[in-house]
């Protein structure tokens, strides 16, 4: 028997959602691809959805996360601002730490459940 501990991480400011798994994937895709439209295509999302998601994160935090350049095909693009890169890094650090905790507890509970099932109840 193998037990898995799973979790979802999101960051809030007050009671307002800033970033969770979806926002993380959006920022990461923008960072990798270099455009909002390219990130949207990569993630199978609409450009409008990605743009609005980023806009909501920026308004909630009060900082610019993505520097988008207008220009159309071949001339536009987007990159994360230093604040956007920092948010991505913070989220990744939280995920890494939470993955370590989840792994520890998965192993611990697997052993504990094995011990429970070895008894005749």
Image (tube, helix red, strand yellow):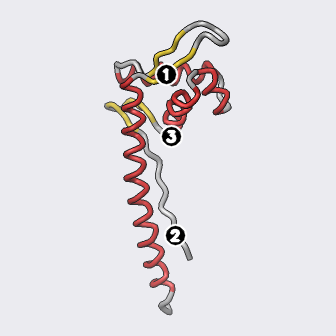
Residue depicted at x 47% and y 19%: 55
Callout 3 touching callout 2 (CB < 8 Å): no
The residue that mark 3 highlights is 21
The residue that mark 1 highlights is 79
SS for tag 2?
Answer: loop
Q: Quadrant of the N terminus?
A: bottom right
| Residue 76 in the image, given as x and y percentages of width and height | 58, 12
Dot 3 or dot 2: first in sequence order is 2
| Residue 30 in the image, given as x and y percentages of width and height | 54, 27
The residue that mark 2 highlights is 3
Q: Looking at the picture, does residue 40 appear above or below residue 121?
A: above
Comparing marks 2 and 1, which lies closer to the viewer? Answer: 1
Q: CA distance from mark 1 to mark 3?
A: 19 Å
SS for tag 1?
Answer: strand
| Residue 29 in the image, given as x and y percentages of width and height | 56, 32
Dot 1 or dot 3: first in sequence order is 3
Residue depicted at x 49% and y 21%: 79
Comparing marks 1 and 3, which lies closer to the viewer? Answer: 1
Q: Looking at the picture, does residue 13 appear above or below residue 109?
A: above
Callout 1 touching callout 3 (CB < 8 Å): no
- Looking at this view, is 85 or 94 the one in front? 85
């Amino acid at each position: 028997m193998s037990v898995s501990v799973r979790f979802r991480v999101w960051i809030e400011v007050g009671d307002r959602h800033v970033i969770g798994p979806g926002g993380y994937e959006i920022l990461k895709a923008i960072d990798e691809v270099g455009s909002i439209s390219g990130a949207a295509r990569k993630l199978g999302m609409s450009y409008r959805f990605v743009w609005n998601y980023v806009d909501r994160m920026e308004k909630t935090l009060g900082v610019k996360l993505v520097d988008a350049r207008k220009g159309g095909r071949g001339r536009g693009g987007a990159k994360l601002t230093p604040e956007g890169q920092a948010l991505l890094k913070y989220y990744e650090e939280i995920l890494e730490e939470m993955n370590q905790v989840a792994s520890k507890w998965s192993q611990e509970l697997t052993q504990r459940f094995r011990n429970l099932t070895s008894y005749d109840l």
